[in-house]
């Protein structure tokens, strides 16, 4: 069956903001009189929603949060995130993102962004980078309850795209996901989708072992070869 949709993670795929996110999460802990531990960031936060990450960080310190408290923390992080990015003349968008979006639009492939960050953060990145008009749907961490490695975010994206385009009849097997973390790859595969792992955050060999395809950089993704697979060719482990 043809490739009908490509679903992009945001942090680590569209925007290079992992260090900024780590800094902001550590600041939230300090604000609450809790001690940060830099070694926790990768296992607890990379590829996961802000809600899940903060919940685990606080529970490890004996702090159990209700939903109102958690929302206030997420909102505080989102406000600081935008304020810090406002100081940058240009957002750190990864090379290849704009060109790939253009190719997909030319091929009339549906596009969604799926993120665990707050809606305000994702919308800010997409508007500020002038990419908002290039995508059909945005799913944020505000739109689903359980994040990676569970598939909820990607399944929500399918529902959004089908609601916008009822004739699309989109199914998980029709989708390609672009991810940069093991948790994100697991979520996409749990949703029944094929995955490109881009080595922006983890090394290439880790992406190669876990994703259907792996690339060092998004500029190396050969879209025509991916389409051949969706049109019936044998699935490969590496593209580029």
Image: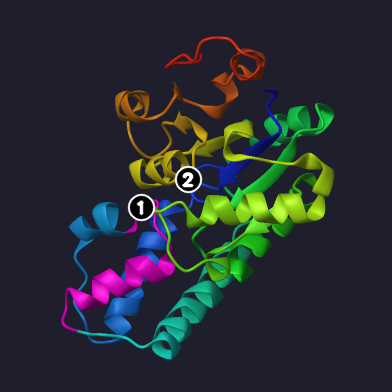
Residue at position x 34%, y 30% in the image: 210
Q: Is the magenta stretch mostly helix, strand or loop?
A: helix
Residue at position x 83%, y 43% in the image: 167
Between 94 and 8, the one nearer to me in the picture: 8
Left or right? Give the position of 197 relative to 15: left
Q: Please tell me how crowded label 1 is: few (under 14), some (14-19), or many (20+) other residues with Cα within 10 Å.
A: many
Q: Mark 1 sits on what residue?
A: 46
Q: Mark 2 sits on what residue?
A: 12
Color scheme of the displayed model:
rainbow
Tell me the magenta residue range. 45-62
Between 80 and 5, the one nearer to me in the picture: 5
Q: Please tell me how crowded label 2 is: few (under 14), some (14-19), or many (20+) other residues with Cα within 10 Å.
A: many
Which quarter of the figure has residue 25? bottom left
Q: Position of residue 216 (x, y in %)?
A: 44, 24
If you read the primary sequence from the N terminus, does the residue marked by circle 1 or circle 2 appear first? Answer: 2
Label count reads: 2
The reply to whether the C-beta atoms of the residues labelled 1 and 2 are less than 8 Å apart is yes
Q: Real-space Cα distance between discs 1 and 2?
A: 9 Å
Q: Where is residue 75 in the image (x, y as percent from the top left)?
A: 51, 80
The answer to whether one can see residue 46 in this image is: yes
Answer above or below: position of 233 versus 72. above
Residue at position x 30%, y 23% in the image: 205
Residue at position x 38%, y 42% in the image: 186
Which quarter of the figure has residue 209? top left
Q: Is residue 28 magenta?
A: no
Q: Quadrant of the N terminus?
A: top right
Q: Position of residue 161 (x, y in %)?
A: 72, 50
Left or right? Give the position of 112 relative to 36: right
Secondary structure found at label 1? loop
Q: Position of residue 33 (x, y in %)?
A: 23, 86
């Amino acid at each position: 069956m043809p490739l009908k949709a490509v679903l992009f993670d945001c942090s680590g795929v569209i925007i290079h903001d992992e260090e900024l996110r780590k800094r902001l999460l550590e600041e939230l802990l300090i604000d609450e009189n809790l001690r940060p531990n830099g070694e926790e960031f990768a296992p607890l936060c990379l590829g996961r929603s802000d809600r899940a990450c903060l919940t685990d960080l606080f529970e490890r310190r004996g702090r159990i949060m209700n939903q109102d408290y958690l929302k206030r923390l997420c909102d505080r992080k989102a406000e600081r995130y935008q304020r810090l990015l406002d100081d940058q003349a240009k957002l750190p968008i990864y090379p290849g993102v704009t060109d790939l979006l253009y190719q997909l639009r030319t091929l009339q492939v549906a596009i969604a962004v799926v993120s665990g960050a707050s809606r305000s953060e994702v919308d800010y990145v997409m508007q500020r980078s002038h990419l908002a008009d290039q995508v059909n749907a945005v799913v944020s961490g505000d739109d689903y309850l359980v994040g990676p490695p569970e598939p909820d975010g990607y399944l929500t994206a399918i529902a959004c795209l089908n609601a916008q385009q009822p004739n699309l009849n989109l199914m998980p097997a029709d989708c390609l996901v672009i991810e940069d973390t093991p948790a994100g790859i697991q979520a996409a595969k749990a949703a029944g989708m094929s995955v490109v792992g881009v080595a922006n955050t983890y090394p290439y060999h880790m992406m190669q072992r876990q994703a259907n395809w792996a690339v060092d950089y998004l500029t190396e993704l050969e879209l025509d070869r991916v389409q051949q697979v969706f049109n019936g060719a044998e699935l490969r482990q590496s593209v580029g």
